[in-house]
Image (cartoon, helix red, strand yellow):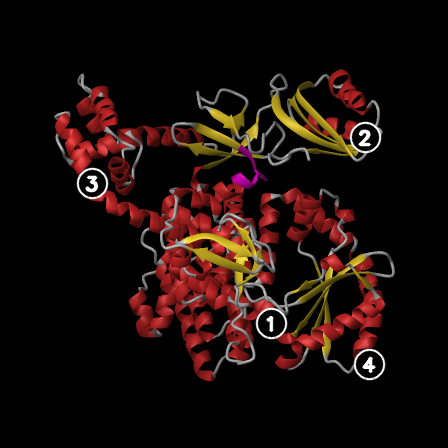
Amino acid sequence: MAIASIDYESERKEILQQYRELISAAVPKTTEEDQQQIKKAFQIAAEAHKDMRRKSGEPYIIHPIEVARIAVEEIGLGATSIICALLHDVVEDTDYTLKDIEELFNPTIARIIDGLTKISGIFDNSDQSHQAENFRKVLLTLSDDVRVILIKLADRLHNMRTLDSLPERKQFKIASETTYLYAPLAHRLGLYAIKSDLEDHALKYTHPEIYETIVTKLRESELERKRFINSFIFPIKKALNQEGLSYKIIHRTKSINSIWKKMKKKEIPFEEVYDLFAIRIVITTPVDQEKQDCWRVYSLVTDFYRPKMDRLRDWISIPKANGYESLHTTVMSSEGKWVEIQIRSQRMDDIAERGFAAHWKYKGDGNVNDLGLDNWLSRIREWLQNPESDALDFLDDFKLNLFSDEIYVFTPKGEIKTLPVNATTLDFAYTIHSQIGNTAIGAKINYKLEPLNKALHSGDQVEIITSRKQKPKEEWYEWVTTARAKTQIKLAIKENRKKYTEPGKRALKQYFRNLKIEYNDANIKALMNYVQTPSEVDFLYKLAIGDIDLENVKAFSMSYKKGNWLRLIKKQFTRKNKTSSSSLYEDIRRKLESKPEQLLLGQDIGKMNYVLAECCNPIPGDDVIGFIKPNKGLEVHRTNCPVAIERMSTFGNSAVKAKWKETPTVEFLTGIKINGIDKVGLVNDITKIISEELSVNIRSLEIKSHDGLSEGIIMLYLSNTYNLKNLITKLQRVEGVQKVQRIKKTDTLK
């Protein structure tokens, strides 16, 4: 096959054109000296990457230029970030060192590039704990200089925009990482446009059919939307002009991912998503008049259109924790359609679109609140600098705080505290101070006495009651949701248990002496393994309080008396178990190396065991993916399963794309949920179609009726998704049935 020749002159012109566009975008934010430094960075990057190409075949230097453009145009960063974006792959991919960068530019640029170099390897290791620890280190850099994460988000966005050239498995892995961590991080930093773009591109590769369907439907309805919007905003523009307000009206279609999430949450088709777009009114007004002018615009809008009062959101009086400020309302148009309207000032709009970058721009204004962003970074810094916290626990807690919506709770003196939804009284206590949390015994919520595990709601006023005799207990872990509370409880319990170290050692020495066991590290570790207590502090604590006693140690000793003692010790200090795990892992990997896309489920794969995940119950016809689990073979999930997406982010290297072998004689358990009107004979009509017409075997059937409605969950055995879709289609035609859908693990009857 002939290899196409490369037109180097055309490529050179293209590179220079993109560089000029970058400089043009940077001019308003940079000085002439800055521009000279940017030019030097570009020349170094161009020379360093001159022989490198991306998977798409284009010159590699295009990528850092595009990352820099996103940083300046879409995030609003300045000269330092542009230079770092241009150089972000130089240290990792070429002979340049951080010391070289520091000498050529300055220590700040070298430090940011060091952070960017570290973050690139977060997901490249199949060991989840290793990944979590790397992520923790990166966030430590974030807490010192947030530009590391902002540039990394720009880098990830450009990678997502150019993902087509990678293999399907790699696309799915990168898209899953993006959904799992990068998009929520962009949201937390207030970068809503970046977050939406990342999510839309991720959806394109995790659910391509859904993505294309929504894109097509949006394209088909575009002209109708434009006509409707022009008609809707006409009276509003007229009223705003009469009031003499300086404004602009922007209409933006809801992101594709947001539309899909709404369809899933409401269980409705595309045509029933009423808020496909939002209309934003942005006013130019002094900071001290922002609030009153926004409410003034709200009053003008509601003169023409009736508002839906339960959809009013006032994030001007109390901004979100990431600094977002806006007034949201949903109104009924003259054509009978609900329309979401966002009202905000130009300053608020800058912060909403560019998050942290705009936050720093306005921070110097004495009339502008801190917006909570510095407090959020301070909390990250506190979590990261705790040497006792486990990396995986930290990652889980951090993600929990990324995803959660916020509530606003008041102290007795009226100070506002921001907490995640479902936070409890005990979470609030630890938000005030670790000592308040450690000694809390109860609280007064809105002047009423309540327990520590009471869930809080926005607007609650909370007073914590403490006692010096109180100490944190293990059950408190179940009572809190915030990372700060969990960390402080763990530290306090561990600190308290350290007091039992010497009594625990004395007890252990006595037990070993009684049973003539040598007191050494090997035997102690073997006993810890036997009683399944890996923490030395917890082990000695249990010995001190009698949870581990002489009988336990005697049973441990007797188990290995007849020649097994040495085997036990060897078991603890050799890699035998790890090797067998690794051997099975590598054995499966070798079997799949030649044709990784040809793993057929439903046949004997060289004695390779696999299980179907209970969280999503995959059946033939579903797009599936397998995860190699040491000593357990493969665990198979549907590709749209949330658990699969999370595992792709942390165990991506153990993932195997799979497909089904046609095995019509094999049936798999799945389930459907039916909603309808309660009527005589409904159950009979449903079971008749399932059992008699389609000859499908029912495992269980549960139907409940309330207020004239029926709801049921039916578990049954089917051989593939074609039969499932056929069954759903036939059931939807039954009189009284309104909706039939495949169940999720979380589905229950109300």
Q: Which residue is mark 4?
A: 242
Q: Is residue 638 magenta?
A: yes
Chain part drawn in magenta: 637-643
Disc 2 + disc 3, Cβ < 8 Å: no
Distance of label 1 from label 2 (alpha carbons) = 52 Å
Q: Which residue is mark 1?
A: 350
Q: Nearer the viewer, mark 2 or mark 3?
A: 3
- Above or below residue 53? Residue 647 is above
Disc 3 + disc 4, Cβ < 8 Å: no
Residue 357, percent from left and from top:
52, 70
Disc 4 marks which amino acid? Gln
Distance of label 3 from label 4 (alpha carbons) = 82 Å
Distance of label 3 from label 1 (alpha carbons) = 61 Å
Q: Is residue 316 magenta?
A: no
Q: Which residue is mark 3?
A: 503
- SS label for mark 1: helix
Disc 3 marks which amino acid? Pro
Question: Based on the displayed image, in which of its 4 quarters is residue 234 positioned?
Answer: bottom right
- Above or below residue 356? Residue 600 is above
Q: Nearer the viewer, mark 1 or mark 2?
A: 2
Please report the residue visible at 39 percent of the width from the left and 69 percent of the height from the top. 44
